[in-house]
């Protein structure tokens, strides 16, 4: 009986106009906007290219001082770059809808 209830339970899906925009896509859009590469950003903030790759792919969350450096260079608030997709979508839809669709 308990197993039947557990099997029938499901979490509601988050509803949005677009699917979630990955951290990687956000980084790519912002780097493209300033004409720079992920390797350049790694050098600017003083981390290895491997570490920057992990951050950009959402596999490693940076410490607050590193997050601040990254966001300052990319000229974006931290909650937009690292937060929920709704913050990104509300930040600047023109950038999102034109550049990710390419």
Image (cartoon, grey):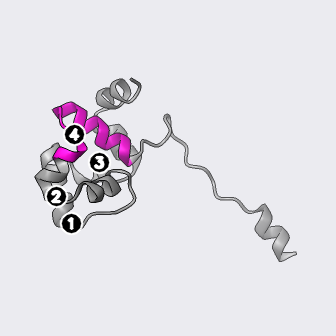
Looking at the image, is mark 3 or mark 2 earlier in the sequence? 2
Q: Which residue is mark 1?
A: 64
Q: Secondary structure at mark 1?
A: helix
At x 29%, y 43%, the residue is: 27
At x 24%, y 44%, the residue is: 38
Q: Label 1, label 4: how many angstroms apart (C-alpha)?
A: 22 Å
Q: Which residue is mark 2?
A: 68
Q: Which residue is mark 4?
A: 37
The boundaries of the magenta stretch are 23-40
Looking at the image, is mark 1 or mark 4 earlier in the sequence? 4
Q: Label 1, label 2: how many angstroms apart (C-alpha)?
A: 6 Å
Most common SS among magenta residues? helix
Q: Label 3, label 1: how many angstroms apart (C-alpha)?
A: 14 Å
Q: Secondary structure at mark 4?
A: loop
Q: For residue 87: magenta?
A: no
Q: Label 3, label 2: how many angstroms apart (C-alpha)?
A: 12 Å
């Amino acid at each position: 009986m308990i197993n039947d209830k557990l099997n029938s339970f499901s979490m509601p899906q988050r509803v949005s106009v677009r699917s979630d925009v990955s951290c990687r896509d956000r980084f790519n859009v912002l780097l493209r906007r300033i004409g720079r590469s992920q390797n350049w950003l790694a050098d600017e903030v003083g981390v290895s290219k491997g570490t920057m790759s992990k951050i950009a792919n959402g596999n490693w969350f940076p410490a607050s001082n590193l997050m601040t450096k990254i966001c300052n260079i990319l000229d974006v608030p931290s909650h937009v770059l690292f937060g929920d997709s709704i913050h990104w979508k509300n930040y600047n839809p023109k950038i999102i809808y034109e550049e990710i669709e390419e």
